[in-house]
Amino acid sequence: MQLIDGKKTSAEIKKEIAAEVESMTARGIRRPHLAAILVGHDGGSETYVANKVKSCAECGFTSTLLRFEDDITEQQLLAEVAKLNENPDIDGFIVQLPLPAHIDEQKVIEAVSPDKDVDGFHPVNVGRLSIGLPGFKSATPAGIIELLRRYGISTRGKHVVVIGRSNIVGKPIASLLMQKGNTGDATVTVCHSHTQNLKDIVRSADIIIAALGKPGFVTADMVKDGATVIDVGTTRVPDASRKSGFRLCGDVDFDNVAPKCEFITPVPGGVGPMTIVSLMLNTLQAAKQRRGC
Ligand code: GUN
């Protein structure tokens, strides 16, 4: 069994990005600039956004954090999005999800200009990804593909079973893996809450991508010997022994599944750090496009 170390890989990629940014600035090209909108005080969102701002600094990017209380109206938030769309200093921006219930998330996602949508959530970017055109790829799926690529795990002709059909992980990772080419060419099955014989289907997988948000859902009896397991779960489970009061729990029963695997990602330190690094890569791509380099 080999552990897929997302923390180490993401640190390497951040160094590569920082080197590229230094070479850009040496040629007189302005640093990439990412903005993030954070509404309210959700603990998970606070942590994610703080990590995104920290990663910007590590990559040599400029970052701007715009915070709003959770009583911001939909109209006010849409006006803030419009300002960022028009601001020539901003290369790309994200609106951290989830948003308060009185705001229509999809409306906000569709208000972001596709050429600044470094989350890859706008239907234009989702559509481009699904037909194999260049565009901003949703960060978590892009991070998974990069991990598989860097660990030399071929997907060609393999049966990949994705558990979960969310717009930001399940659907786009299934699209990417079925594309023609080196990091695709897989036979993909997507399982969800209505799938019959789910255990049997998962057991037939060469590569399992667990992205349903249920701690410990994938058990050893569902995994064939020699499979590769990618765990996207990051559920916060109360844990009084931790200073934070919680621990992050993956969707895979790691201790019992790991011995059966050829490769497996841990939680934390697997997919999570790669998600943030993919956002940095999208922001670098946005900056290069805007500067024509
Ligand atoms: N909430 C959970 N994951 C994400 C993400 O990748 N981007 C944004 N904007 N919000 C999220």
Image (cartoon, helix red, strand yellow):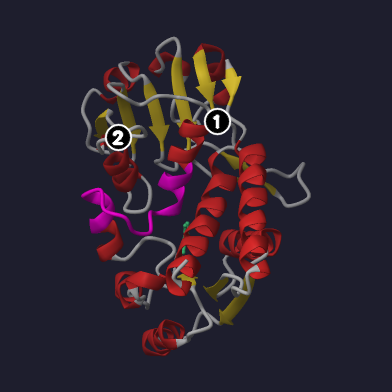
Q: Can residue 210 be seen from the camera position used here? A: yes
Tags 1 and 2 touching, CB below 8 Å? no
Q: Which residues are magenta?
A: 127-143
Q: Is residue 255 left or right of residue 136?
A: right
- Residue 265 is labelled as 1
Q: Quadrant of residue 189?
A: top left
Q: Amino acid at mark 1?
A: Thr
Of the pair 265 and 117, the residue shown nearer to us: 117
Q: Picture coordinates of residue 195 (x, y %)?
A: 22, 32
- Mark 1 vs mark 2, foreground winner is 2
Of the pair 165 and 206, the residue shown nearer to us: 206
Does dot 2 land on a helix, a strand or a loop? loop
The mark that comes first in sequence, 1 or 2, is 2
Spatial distance from mark 1 to mark 2, Cα to Cα? 23 Å
Does dot 1 land on a helix, a strand or a loop? loop
Look at the picture and state if 131 lies above or below 233: below
Q: Can residue 165 be seen from the camera position used here? A: no
Q: Picture coordinates of residue 134 (x, y %)?
A: 31, 55
Residue behind mark 2: 181
Of the pair 147 and 209, the residue shown nearer to us: 147
Q: Is 140 inside the magenta-drawn segment?
A: yes
Q: Picture coordinates of residue 1 (x, y %)?
A: 57, 15
Look at the picture and state if 286 lies above or below 132: below
